[in-house]
C-alpha cells in the first residue's frame, strides 16, 4: 500500500504545470523585467501527494486517493483565485499609472518624463515596466497579465502610434482607458457583492457531510468506519465525494460566469 501511494505521489510531482510554463515563457520574451520566481514544484500535485499520503497512511488507500483528488482540485481553485486577485491588482495599478500619465501630459511634460511618473504611480513593478515599454516602443509590446490588462495596453499602444502620427492628445486616450478600467473594477466589486450569498450557501452545503459524520459519531454510531471498511460504505463514500466535488465545481463555475 505504501509503495503504491509513493508511486502516485511521484507521478503527481512530475505532473506538468502549464501555468508555470506560461510564466517562464513570458519572463523570457516580454522584456518588461523579471517576474516573480516560479516555484520549482507545482502546487496542486504537491498538495495532492501530501494529502494522499497522509490520508492513506492514517486510513485506507481509498481514503488516500479521494483526499488526493480533493486536495488537487482545492489547490487549483486556490491558485485560480490568486490569479484573479493578481489580475485585478494589475488592472488597478495600470489605472493609477494612466491617471498620472494623463495629468503629467496635460501639465506639459514630455512623454519620456510622464512615463516615468506613470510607472512610479502604478505601484506594481511588472505593470509599470509593461506600461513604459508600451509608451516607448509602440507596436512591439506583448500582452502581460489578464485579458483586460492586455487589451488596455493594446489601446495605449494604438494611442501612442496615433498621437505620434497625427499629433492628437495622448492624455485624452489615457484618461478614457483609465475610466474604462475603473468601471470594470467597480462592476466586478458589485458582482462579487451580489454573489456573496450564493457563495456562502455553497460553502455551507459543502460542509454539511462533515457535520453529518460528526453528529453520527456523537450519538454512538460509527459512520466513518462503515464508509471506509465495508464494500457498500466504500461505494457510498466514492459516490458522495464525487457528488460533493461536482456540486462545488458547478457552483464555482456559475459564480465565475457571473463575475465575467
Image (tube, helix red, strand yellow):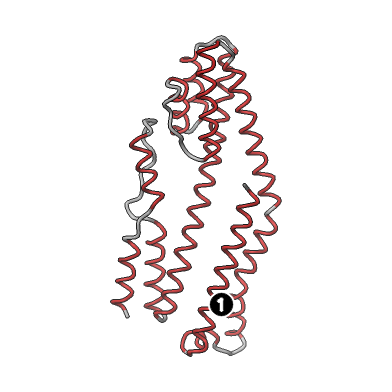
Image location of residue 116, percent across then percent down: 46, 20
SS category of the residue bearing label 1: helix
Image location of residue 241, percent across then percent down: 53, 74
154 and 242: which one is in front? 154
Name which residue lies at 50% across and 49% down. Answer: 82
Name which residue lies at 48% across and 68% down. Answer: 70
Q: Which residue is mark 1?
A: 240
Above or below: residue 227 compared with residue 168 = below
45 and 169: which one is in front? 169
Image location of residue 160, percent across then percent down: 51, 19
Above or below: residue 241 compared with residue 221 = above
- On-image quarter of the N terminus: bottom left
Image location of residue 224, percent across then percent down: 52, 84
Name which residue lies at 57% across and 71% down. Answer: 244
Determine the image quadrant of residue 15.
bottom left
Crowd around label 1: few <14 · some 14–19 · many ≥20 (10 Å): few
Amino acid at each position: 500500500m505504501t509503495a503504491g501511494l509513493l508511486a502516485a505521489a511521484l507521478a503527481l510531482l512530475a505532473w506538468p504545470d502549464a501555468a508555470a510554463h506560461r510564466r517562464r515563457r513570458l519572463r523570457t520574451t516580454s522584456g518588461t523585467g523579471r517576474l516573480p520566481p516560479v516555484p520549482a514544484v507545482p502546487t496542486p500535485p504537491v498538495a495532492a501527494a501530501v494529502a494522499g499520503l497522509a490520508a492513506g497512511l492514517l486510513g485506507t488507500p481509498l481514503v488516500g486517493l479521494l483526499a488526493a483528488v480533493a486536495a488537487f482540485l482545492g489547490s487549483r481553485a486556490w491558485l485560480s483565485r490568486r490569479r484573479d486577485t493578481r489580475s485585478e491588482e494589475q488592472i488597478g495599478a495600470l489605472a493609477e499609472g494612466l491617471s498620472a500619465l494623463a495629468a503629467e501630459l496635460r501639465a506639459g511634460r514630455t512623454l519620456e518624463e510622464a512615463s516615468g511618473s506613470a510607472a512610479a504611480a502604478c505601484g506594481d513593478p511588472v505593470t509599470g515596466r509593461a506600461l513604459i515599454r508600451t509608451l516607448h516602443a509602440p507596436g512591439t509590446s506583448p500582452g502581460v497579465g489578464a485579458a483586460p490588462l492586455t487589451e488596455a495596453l493594446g489601446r495605449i499602444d494604438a494611442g501612442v502610434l496615433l498621437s505620434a502620427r497625427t499629433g492628437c492628445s495622448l492624455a485624452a486616450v489615457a484618461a478614457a482607458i483609465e475610466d474604462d478600467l475603473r468601471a470594470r473594477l467597480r462592476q466586478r466589486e458589485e458582482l462579487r457583492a451580489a454573489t456573496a450569498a450564493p457563495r456562502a450557501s455553497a460553502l455551507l452545503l459543502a460542509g454539511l457531510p462533515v457535520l453529518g459524520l460528526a453528529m453520527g459519531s456523537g450519538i454512538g454510531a460509527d459512520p466513518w468506519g462503515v464508509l471506509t471498511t465495508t464494500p457498500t460504505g466504500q461505494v457510498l463514500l466514492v459516490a458522495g465525494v464525487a457528488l460533493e466535488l461536482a456540486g462545488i465545481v458547478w457552483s464555482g463555475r456559475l459564480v465565475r460566469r457571473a463575475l465575467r
